[in-house]
Image (cartoon, rainbow, N blue to C red):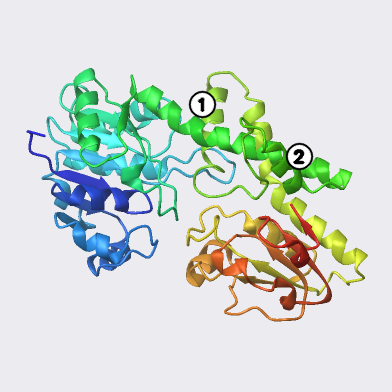
Amino acid sequence: MSEIINIGVIGLGYVGLPLAVEFGKKFPVTGFDIHQLRIDELVNGHDRTLETSDEDLKSAVHLKYTSRLDDLKACNYFIVTVPTPIDKHKRPDLSPLIKASESVGKVLKKGDIVIYESTVYPGATEEECVPMLEKFSGLKFNQDFFCGYSPERINPGDKVHTVTKILKVTSGSTPEIAIKVDNLYKSIITAGTYMASSLKVAEAAKVIENSQRDINIAFVNELSLIFNKLGIDTHEVLAAAGTKWNFLKFYPGLVGGHCIGVDPYYLTHKAQEMGYNPEIILAGRRLNDNMGFYVANRVIKRMIQNGHTIAGSRVLVLGMTFKENCPDIRNSRVIDVVSEFKEYSCNVDVFDPWADAKEVKHEYDVDLVDKPGTDYDAVVLAVAHNEFKNMNVRAFGRKEAVIYDIKGLLDKSQYDERL
């Protein structure tokens, strides 16, 4: 690329840091985060999310970290990778994105390009972010500065499909800017890029990726509810059906995390705003959001059948992160299982060798145990960490303990029921 490139990456979490590191191997990059503790950790050469190794951090020789906005003034490309969560009413919470846009607007110059990677509904970049950039910079969109949208596709904990190995969708606010944005990502993405025709198309492509997965998982979760009533093992049914070449292999489970359990609400919000009430997407969300409560109640029924007194009983939950072999606890639906047991006055221990105990306490007010006991009335395997694969889970329970396997990880001899 012939132009001088100086990149600012705003937000150094699961998405921003791996991107900053890859760009930092080729271009001057300033990684910006509002949390000084995060900056200090990265300056000391360690990423607690484990998305980037200490060796990889060292290899980004042109990358520096800061929490000072003024340090971004020399940048001419800004890549925004802040979270886009939902609020307690399951409506899009764009406040992190708005604040990031305000910050970028304060250091924006003529000719600069702002690229958003955060998941949003179609139109959000131009409707919500651009006005903030104009307001705080005093510049005019598509005259003085420009925008791009390139949705993140990071899969936390995945050491195979890393940022450079996932094909990247790109877009720009003008045809010329689209080419510039595409070329920028082509410089690091070995899997290649796909240039969408507009910002809205790229935004829509991202939000339906996870909505599609959510609906597919909701379908097999509903199958699990049906097959349980019929006395059929869902995983055995899926194994048989999966012998057909075009059968899509999805499995039942808890649907959490910062993407699949959140992104559909961005799309449905925009649809409702436009006067359309989506049915399939919201039905899938309702079903998936209730699976934690379903699991806990199935275990309680089994415990009653085995003669346990529910109030005061001891329950062990194995796993707290939203997915296996990853420390990410954001929007983990394991908390629904834990909360439901507590509603029945059960004493619940949660063990997770991957999760940070302080983060879990802060986010969910749950104290992780350092080591499980051996006298539980029920054990629920909630997350398929490698550490749990070869465990004798029954050893944690009393003689009549109920063992429930949400993830389909255990051998038949190790569980009484699975989702």
- Going from N to C along the chain, the mark reached first, 2 or 1, is 2
**Residue 58 image point, x, y percent:** 21, 63
**Residue 12 image point, x, y percent:** 31, 53
Callout 2 crowding tier (Cα within 10 Å): few <14, some 14–19, many ≥20: some
Numbered tag placed on residue 270 in the rendering:
1
In 3D space, how far apart are the residues under numbered discs 2 and 1 (Cα atoms)?
A: 29 Å
Residue appearing at x 62%, y 53% in the figure? 333
Instruction: Read off the residue under disc 2.
Output: 223
**Residue 352 image point, x, y percent:** 57, 69
Q: Is residue 325 above or below residue 261?
A: below
The quadrant in which residue 147 appears is top left
Numbered tag placed on residue 394 in the rendering:
none
| Left or right, 207 with reference to 20 | right
The quadrant in which residue 375 appears is bottom right
Q: Is residue 267 visible?
A: yes
Q: Is residue 285 visible?
A: no
What is the secondary structure assignment of the residue under circle 2? helix
The quadrant in which residue 388 appears is bottom right
The number of numbered discs placed on residues in the rendered structure image is 2
What is the secondary structure assignment of the residue under circle 1? helix
| Left or right, 194 with reference to 134 | right
Nearest the camera: 262 or 210?
210
**Residue 40 image point, x, y percent:** 26, 67
Q: Nearer the viewer, mark 2 or mark 1?
A: 2
Question: Residue type at mark 2?
Answer: Leu
Asked if disc 2 and disc 1 are in contact, CB closer than 8 Å, the reply is: no
Nearest the camera: 364 or 236?
236
Quarter in which the N terminus is drawn:
top left
Question: Residue type at mark 1?
Answer: Lys
Residue appearing at x 18%, y 38% in the figure? 77
